[in-house]
Image (tube, rainbow, N blue to C red):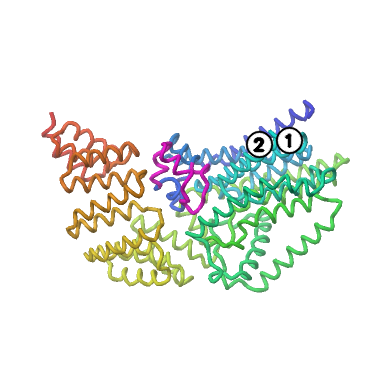
Amino acid sequence: MTRGRLALCCLLGGLLFAGTMWLFWPALQGEFLHYDDDVYVTENPIVQQGFTRESVRWAFTTLHAVNWHPLTWLSHLLDVELFGRSAWGHHLTSVLLHALNAVLLFGAVSAMTRAPWPAFFVAALFAVHPLRVESVAWISERKDVLCACFGFAALWAYASFAARGGALRYLAVLLLFAASLLSKPMLVSLPLVLLLLDHWPLRRSERTRWRRLILEKMPLFAMAGAISLVTLKAQSEGPLRSLEEVPLALRVMNAAVAYVEYLAQTVHPVDLAVLYPHPGRSLPLWKGIAALVALAAVSVGVARARRQPCLVVGWLWYLFALLPVIGIVQVGEQAHADRYTYVPIVGIELAVAFFVAPLVAGSKARAAAAALLASAGVLLLAPMTRAQIDVWRSTEPLFEHALAVTTDNAVAHTELGVIVASQGRVDEARAHFEEAIRIDPTFSPARSFLGKALALSGKPIDAEAVLREALKLDPKTPRGHQHLGVALQLQRRWKEAAAEYRLALEAGDARGVENVYESLAATLRLDGDVAGARKAAEELVLAHPEYAKGHGLLARELLAEGKAREALAQADEAIRRQPRLADAHFVRGAALGTLGRFNEAVESFRQALSLDPRHEEAKEGLRRALPRAR
């Protein structure tokens, strides 16, 4: 590369990074969402510890959130270590990664094609498009931007390997690909994409036999296969839908429609939503067939354009890269999702940029017109992206927007109901849950949350009826048993409530498991079984010794049995693991007071109140301890 071209590439890369940072900077004002951000960060007791030996070990061994993505967990641990519970810092990391991704993509495409200006257009369109907002502004989707970061770096390393060869360059490709898969198993199709790039623009297939090129990719295919098996195992315990729920023919038709929808949203990115409900059996047959015909027609058309290999490569990049998330293996309730386009749509951008480039080459007027049109397109997208970032600032407007731009969205109604219920707006929450049930009578989460709302609004008998209906639909749901336990507990049916909490734990969902154990212990204690309550806390500590809240719960139960020294040890362990756990500081103070160490008790109560000024038990403990302290 000449000095002039290197200087140009550095300038364009700097513009990409700075422009992307400026465009997405408002994302830093966003909150943590009550939609997976609790699972990944705010209510995750391991992540809240930051970097510890236990949390790092957990990151590499857990299938929490139905995925195995240890590098993503490490990135969240680092954010907690650096920024605590300040959402802006977590958003900053995602925005930085997205800006870096734009630069890496530009570098990779420029290195492969030796055409910096079309590569710049590809990267700029990638960076500013509104479809990128979901991956960047949603903290839970850190896995998207991190996976792409290593994936684009692997592309750049592959361009270097293709040009110069060498074992170290090949090893760099392997390691970067592995890091991408350990962030999110999205790029399992990268080996296929590399074979496409061998055809164009690298043109390795002109001087090397395909058999050798395929054999060269076998380690990559092996890694992709291994991570795919792990992912299927993880998701089989969660949102993986069966063929009885979504038949294969329906999956194929919805996949075809999704391919077309993504293209339409790329050209006209309006009415974007956090969740597009799966149409299920209501998907019109004509729509699925029309989408399949359209895809087949485009495929035939690009296959015939032999003089434009960029079209074949770009189109197949798009098809292959979307394949893992297109819905043939149906996970969750969505028909498609904006975040899934983060890497696949690069194929379309690549095809367009390098189809146009030779058409305007040799004419300054045509080149200037193309540059003007490209710049105008990118600039027109920027305000749309800013508006979409604003949609993602907090949970309630996010789902209100989803309801405004989609129809029959049971999930959005349910999630919005959960949010307004947490704000005490129970009647409004009930309306959302009931509408979700009307839309999809088989959607058990809506019934489960409706039951919880009824229980907490003083109607535990009505709640019980709704929750038992929810459990008929999905007998293995931990949430349904947990909420039924609450309804029974409010009716003072302690033993039945305890049995439901046990069933919730047996269902095996680790999310909020410490809260279920806490409810179980409280129920047993209210039933007069103090030893049983302590045993429940011991079970939590034994099953999840890394949970600070479990040690705090055990400290409470030991204190209730008069075992102050043992309670103090458990409270200290909870504080060691999570220093900002207010309840552990309170229990520590109560144990110290029981042991007559009132000065230290006062300090612990004050620490608890500094962390949670509304902690009534800590206020009472401080009031009692102060007169006896020296």
> In terms of image quadrants, where is residue 176?
top right
Which numbered dot is residue 160? 1
In magenta, the rendered stretch is: 44-73
Q: Residues within 10 Å of mark 1 (few under 14, many from 20)?
A: some
Q: Can you say whether 506 is above or below 68 in the image?
A: below
Q: Label 1 amino acid? A: Ser
Which residue occupies 17% across, 31% down? 599
> In terms of image quadrants, where is residue 285?
bottom right
Residue picked out by circle 2: 172
Callout in the foreground (2, 1): 2
Q: Is residue 55 magenta?
A: yes
Q: Is residue 529 left or right of residue 131?
A: left
| Residue at the extreme top of the image, as rendered | 3
| Residue at the extreme right of the image, as rendered | 362
What predominant SS class does the magenta segment belong to?
Answer: helix
Instruction: Look at the numbered discs 2 and 1 and tell me whether their residues touch, using CB distance below 8 Å.
Output: yes
Q: Closer to the camera, 588 or 272?
A: 588
